Each structure stands twice: as structure tokens, then as C-alpha cells.
């Protein structure tokens, strides 16, 4: 039971750091889009931002999956 609790707590802590990093990257990416497209409040730039981030997330997820499979 103690081992399971430690594993779950460590998973939660790692997830929390991942969320913080994701929010930091989100802010940085939005700032870049503001520089390129102007204000981020417009619908089209925000849609472009969402699509680009989604594509990057999918590609990175696939890459991480392949790296993980290769290591096992």
C-alpha cells in the first residue's frame, strides 16, 4: 500500500510539473503568434494557433511512443 501511494504521489507531482511547463510554452507560443499575426483576440489567429499546437502535440506524442517502444 505504501509503495502504491508513493507511486501515485510521484505521478501527480510529475503531472503538475508537466502542466506548469505546458502553460509556460502556451504563453510563449501565444506571444510569438501575437508578434506574427497581431492581436491574439482575433478568431483566425487563435484557430491557427490551436491547429498548429494540436499538430505538434500529436507528432510529439507519436515520437515519444516510438522512443518508449524502442527502449522496451
Image (spheres, grey):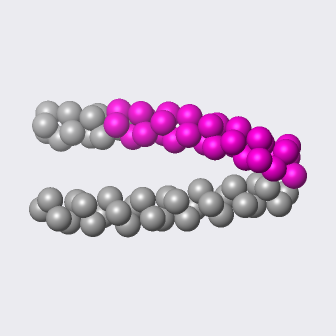
The answer to which quarter of the image holds residue 14 is top left
Q: Nearer the viewer, residue 12 or 27?
A: 27
- Looking at the image, can residue 7 be seen? yes
Q: Determine whether 51 is above or below 4 in the image.
A: below
Q: Determine whether 68 is above or below 31 in the image.
A: below
Q: Residue at x 79, y 55 (%)?
A: 45
The answer to which quarter of the image holds residue 9 is top left
Residue 47: where, in percent of width, then height? 75, 61
Q: Determine whether 69 is above or below 11 in the image.
A: below
Q: Residue at x 30, y 40 (%)?
A: 11
Q: Residue at x 83, y 60 (%)?
A: 44
- Give the quarter of the figure containing the N terminus: top left
Q: Residue at x 64, y 43 (%)?
A: 29
Check if residue 36 falls in the magenta segment: yes
The answer to which quarter of the image holds residue 43 is bottom right
Check if residue 21 falls in the magenta segment: yes
- Looking at the image, can residue 23 be seen? no
Segment tinted magenta in the rendering: 13-42
Residue 46: where, in percent of width, then height? 76, 54
In the rendered structure, the answer to whether residue 60 lies left or right of residue 67 reads: right
- Give the quarter of the figure containing the C terminus: bottom left
Q: Nearer the viewer, residue 12 or 40?
A: 40
Amino acid at each position: 500500500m505504501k509503495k502504491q501511494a508513493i507511486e501515485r504521489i510521484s505521478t501527480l507531482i510529475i503531472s503538475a510539473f508537466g502542466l506548469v511547463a505546458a502553460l509556460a510554452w502556451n504563453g510563449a507560443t501565444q506571444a510569438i503568434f501575437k508578434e506574427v499575426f497581431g492581436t491574439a483576440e482575433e478568431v483566425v489567429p487563435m484557430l491557427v494557433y490551436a491547429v498548429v499546437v494540436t499538430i505538434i502535440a500529436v507528432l510529439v506524442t507519436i515520437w515519444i511512443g516510438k522512443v518508449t517502444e524502442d527502449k522496451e
